[in-house]
Amino acid sequence: MSQAAVIILGAAVRPDGSASPALRARVQAARAWGERQTPPALYIPTGAIGRHPPAECVVMTAILMEAGVPEDRIHQEPTGTDTFSSALACIALLRRIGHRGEVRLATHRYHLPRCLALFRLAGVRARGVPPPAGPSETGQPRRWAWRLREVPALPYDAALMVWARLRGRV
């Protein structure tokens, strides 16, 4: 059986360099799924430096390693600055390491449809891991802006991915 790869999409890093609750939740969801696999999954945390250093992928790697995931099962992708660039960079990384197994995506429920669409349009048969509870499921105020942002972002990024594929970039 081939090893699955879990791509963990980035989220904010706090001013003190620690993981935001969203970032931590994505890593925990990825790990919960990945460690139940045989063999355990590879992890690809993606995300560059945002408003605050260090890079999102660096913070996610630290969380994974603190939880006992060996460093040789983690492949950081430090260049993704948004969902589209992260998708392109992760697809290139998968090819570079010769990955042929299952690909799973770890992100929040509101973000998963766009992520899945991008990877599938690029020819990657990706599926999601069970997403972490979002703000509305944990009693926090609903973050409608996050959900509403996906409405224009999905067709926009999908068009970019189709264009990238037509130009041979993926």
Image (cartoon, grey):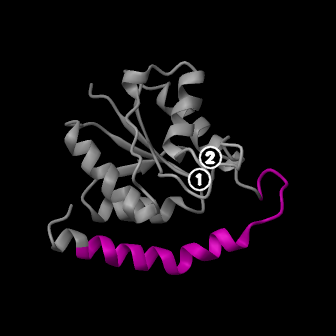
Residue 160 part of the magenta-drawn span: yes
User: In the picture provided, is 25 more to the left or to the right than 82?
Assistant: right
Query: Among all residues in the image, which is located at the extreme left?
Result: 168
> Which span of residues is magenta-colored?
136-163
Residue 117: image location, x then y, percent: 39, 65
Residue 121: image location, x then y, percent: 29, 65
Q: Are marks 2 and 1 in contact (CB under 8 Å)?
A: yes
Q: Main secondary structure of the magenta part?
A: helix
Circle on res. 103: none
* Disc 1: which residue: 11
Quadrant in which residue 100 is drawn: top left
Q: Is residue 116 visible?
A: yes
> Which of the pair 35/62 is nearer the observer?
62
Q: Earlier in the sequence, mark 2 or mark 1?
A: 1
Quadrant location of the N terminus in the rendered image: top left
Residue 150: image location, x then y, percent: 55, 73
